[in-house]
Image (tube, rainbow, N blue to C red):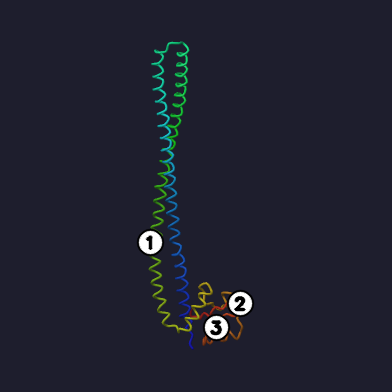
Amino acid sequence: MEIEFENLISLQNLDTEIKHISAFLENIPDKISEIDQKIKSATQIIAEAKEKLALNQKKRRDLENEVQDLKTQISRYKIQLNEVKTNKEYQALLKEIDESQQRIDSLEEEIISEMLSADDINEEIKEATQKYNQEKEILEKEKETINQKQKELETKIQNLSQEKDKFLHQISPPQIKLYRDIFEKKNGIALSRVKDDFCSMCHMRIRPQVLNELIGEKKLILCENCGRILYRQKKSA
């Protein structure tokens, strides 16, 4: 039986390329997911800063409302000053007014502090938004490049598969079956070139008798060590 070594070698080359491209394509969803996660993380930073600003504004409103309530209370106390009949009641109201005013002063200091914090938070939001827009533009371009590469590689696999079919029609079914069995078992490498009387894959020396049988090219010969199909590269190649 004539051995189609050249066709088998071409088939091996095509399968190897298809295998590498397929591995790359399988990783694309993870790459896209990673990019989306980076965009989401950048968005989350902005959202957290805005939430911080919302809490700041709420706290300022609460403080301002408390100040307003105290001012209203002071106004009532001042009205009551004109109505009290004893000095003790008068002094008690003055004390309430003084304590309320002190509380107002303290609250107004807190309000100023919160206003300053709001300025910092707004700046934080501005910087985060700017950074987000820059990163998003870069990441979206990266996604576009990956998607374009995916389309190109999918087209390439189709072309390689069509070319592979041509070789399959030129190789006998028993040889194809043996090739495929070894291809699956040996991580996508079914053939091994004999170089300087050694198997190029496992580096085991080939016995002289086996070398003579290879020269004849009458049957497929497997490496006694790694089990791959052995072949000799022709000088013309």
Q: Name the residue located 46 percent from the left edge and 30 percent from the top edge.
A: 113
Q: Which of marks 3 and 2 is nearer the N terminus?
A: 2
Badge 3 amino acid: Ile
**In the displayed structure, would residue 164 be above or below residue 128?**
below
Q: Residue furthest front?
A: 85
The residue singled out by tag 2 in the image is 204
Element on which disc 2 rests: loop
Residue 150: image x %, image y %?
40, 63
Q: How far apart are marks 3 and 2 (CA)?
A: 14 Å
**In the displayed structure, would residue 17 be above or below residue 144?**
below
The residue singled out by tag 3 in the image is 221
Camera-nearest residue between 186 and 142: 186
Badge 1 amino acid: Gln
Q: Around disc 1, counting alpha carbons within 10 Å, would you say few (fewer than 14), some (14 to 19), or many (20 or more)?
A: few
Camera-nearest residue between 200 and 146: 146
The residue singled out by tag 1 in the image is 148
Badge 2 amino acid: Met
Q: Name the residue located 42 percent from the left edge and 24 percent from the top edge.
A: 70
Q: In which quarter of the image is residue 198?
A: bottom right
Q: Distance between the residues labelled 1 and 2?
A: 44 Å
Residue 141: image x %, image y %?
39, 55
Residue 181: image x %, image y %?
51, 78
Q: Return the mark for residue 101.
A: none
**In the displayed structure, would residue 173 be above or below residue 95?**
below
Q: Quadrant of residue 156?
A: bottom left
Element on which disc 3 rests: loop
Q: How far apart are marks 3 and 1 (CA)?
A: 43 Å
Residue 187: image x %, image y %?
52, 72
